[in-house]
Image (tube, helix red, strand yellow):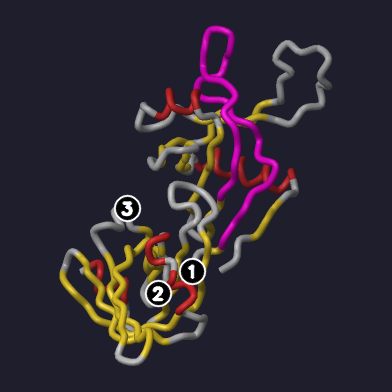
Amino acid sequence: MRWHLLKDKGKITRIIDYLIHEQIEIKVRIEGEETKYSSRFIEIVPGSNRGDVSVSSDKAPELVMDKLVPDRGNGVIQQFPNVGVEVLTDKYLCRFYTKYICGNNASYPYYGLMISFPEFLESEEKRKDERATLESPEVISAMFTLVTGPKKYQSYELNILDYSNHRVGLLVTEKDSNLLQRLNLGDRIPEITIFAEPGLMHMDGTLRHKTRIEDGKRRGSYILGIESNTIIGTIIKE
């Protein structure tokens, strides 16, 4: 499913108003940090010139969000102000990028953290089979072997980043980058072994996409989207 870009300020405002009203949890990722911090939006407030009388008063609104949990994030965000915000609702996954402006202090009346209003928002409709993300992909992996020439074979063991009932997303890092040239969309991968905490399972799969990761700790790596007739998600959760 492709991400949809939304730039309409009015629609973005209505979405954020909804998040505020329903007190929906947001996840905040600080630049350079692997941890995702929890928070929620408190209020949309008028933009401030912050003492600069030369700046027009017609300034973009700003957002107030609650303090981050775990608390460590409230100090880190002051050092690394560029952040990404993710919101998961019943139907959509939304994300946008913003910047920390200031925190609660004696000269500022709002409790929480002030961030800039997003210039755009990206949304993706959730898959019908509801994809899950693994918090510890090193624990669960997949192994398979490809024929690379006459009587030549190469085995790969890749971490699993996410999965759904009939799909699994495999992480391809630089050390396995030759796999990207060896596999084409639509290629069948037989006898994939899934290593999961409950035990082992076996499946055949078909490559449906090769997607480059554009941000975060794994930037530059790729995700291989593998589709199978096997009900993957059910077996992994057992």
* Image-quadrant location for residue 193: bottom left
Left or right: where does residue 2 sit relative to residue 126?
right
Apparent side of residue 49 relative to residue 36 in the rendered image (left or right): right
The disc at residue 56 is none
Image-quadrant location for residue 164: bottom left
- Residue type at the position of mark 2: Arg
Apparent side of residue 124 relative to residue 142 in the rendered image (left or right): right
Indicate the secondary structure of the residue bearing disc 2: strand
Q: Residues within 10 Å of mark 2 (few under 14, many from 20)?
A: many
Answer whether residue 97 is magenta in the image: yes
Quarter holding the C terminus is: bottom left
Give the CA distance from mark 3 to mark 2.
17 Å
What amino acid type should be assigned to the residue bearing mark 1?
A: Arg
The CA span between labels 1 and 2 is 11 Å
Q: Residue 215 at what x, y percent from top left?
A: 52, 49
Could you tell me which secondary element the residue under label 1 belongs to?
loop
Residue that label 1 marks: 127
For marks 1 and 3, give the one nearer the viewer. Answer: 3
Specify the segment rendered in magenta.
Answer: 95-124
Q: Position of residue 75 (x, y in %)?
A: 43, 23
Mark 1–mark 2 contact, CB under 8 Å? yes
- Compare residues 146 and 113 and report the one nearer the observer: 146
Sequence-wise, which precedes: disc 1 or disc 2?
1
- Residue 12 spot, x, y in % from top left: 67, 46
Residue indicated by mark 3: 135
Q: Residue at x 42, y 76 (%)?
A: 226
Which residue is at 52% across, 12% downward?
105
